[in-house]
Amino acid sequence: MLGRNRLTGAPGYLDGWYDEQCGGCRFWVALSGEMGRDWGVCTRTDSGYDGRVRFEHDGCDAFVVRSDGSFG
């Protein structure tokens, strides 16, 4: 599995994925300090990225929108 996926400029990028970025997932936890502005850790056990640091604009198939609609 690649460390990043769903790059917005990549061929085959689906418009619907734009709203399914890690920073908007309820299982994404921002890092502390300056790094937390753009980076966090996936905590969804059924995601291939569980326990990995992810850029807020990355995404995966296990995305679940936050109930409050927040991002980051």
Image (cartoon, rainbow, N blue to C red):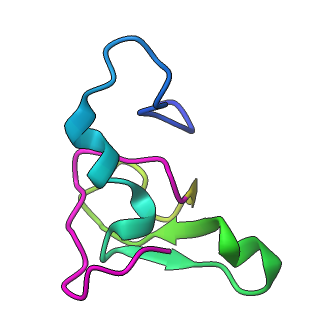
Compared to residue 64, the image places residue 16 above or below, namely above
Residue stretch rendered in magenta on the structure: 56-72
Residue extending furthest top? 11
Q: Nearer the viewer, residue 29 or 43?
A: 29
- Residue 57 point in image, percent of width and height: 50, 51
Residue at the image position 57 percent from the left and 78 percent from the top: 30
Find out whether residue 6 is within the magenta segment.
no
Find out whether residue 66 is within the magenta segment.
yes
- Residue 56 point in image, percent of width and height: 53, 59
Residue extending furthest right? 34
Left or right relative to 59: residue 32: right
Compared to residue 58, the image places residue 14 above or below, namely above
Instruction: Answer with the quarter of the image where residue 40 lies.
Output: bottom right
Residue at the image position 42 percent from the left and 74 percent from the top: 71
Compared to residue 71, the image places residue 7 above or below, namely above
The answer to whether residue 50 is visible is no
Magenta-highlighted stretch: main secondary structure?
loop
Instruction: Answer with the quarter of the image where residue 69 lies.
Output: bottom left
Left or right relative to 52: residue 34: right
The answer to whether residue 27 is visible is yes
Q: Nearer the viewer, residue 46 or 69?
A: 69
Total marks in image:
0
Quarter of the figure that contains the N terminus: top left
